[in-house]
Image (cartoon, helix red, strand yellow):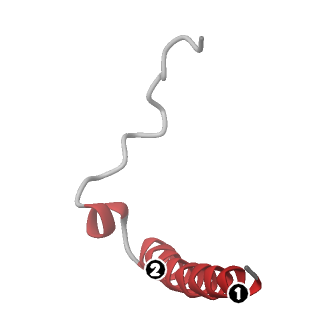
Amino acid sequence: MRAELDTLAALLETHFVYEEKKLVGALNALTAGSTEGLLGVPLPPLDRDPGPVH
């Protein structure tokens, strides 16, 4: 059982490192560029009324 848990821990660690690299890349692109360049769509204007909150 210990070997299985060690394998799972190693797989999760690898996955989290991958996810962290992807997120850092996306965040760097967002701060260096624009949402339109990153996501393909512009952000809505900030002065827009979001409407009632439920």
Secondary structure beneath disc 2? helix
Q: Nearer the viewer, residue 5 or 51?
A: 5
Locate the C terminus and report the quarter of the image it occupies: top right
Residue drawn 42% across the image and 78% down it: 29
C-alpha separation, residue under disc 1 versus residue under disc 2: 25 Å
Task: Report the amino acid beneath label 1.
Answer: Asp
Task: Give the residue at mark 2.
Answer: 22
> Residue at 29% of width from left, 52% of height from top?
42
Of badges 1 and 2, the one in the foreground is: 1
Residue 40, given in percent of the width and then of the height, sits at: 23, 60
Rendered position, 51 above or below 1: above
Q: Is residue 8 left or right of residue 1?
A: left
Residue 36 found in image quarter: bottom left
Which comes before the other along the chain, label 1 or label 2? Answer: 1
* Mark 2 surroundings: few (<14), some (14-19) or many (≥20) residues within 10 A: few
Identify the secondary structure beneath mark 1.
Answer: helix
Quarter of the N terminus within the rendering: bottom right
Observer-nearest of 10 and 21: 10
Pinpoint residue 4: horizontal percent, then vertical percent. 65, 82
**Disc on res. 27:** none
Kind of residue at disc 2: Lys
What's the residue at 48%, 33% (across, down)? Answer: 47
- Outermost residue to the right: 2
- Pointer 1 residue: 6
Q: Which residue is drawn at 48% across and 23% down?
A: 50
42 or 15: which is nearer to us? 15
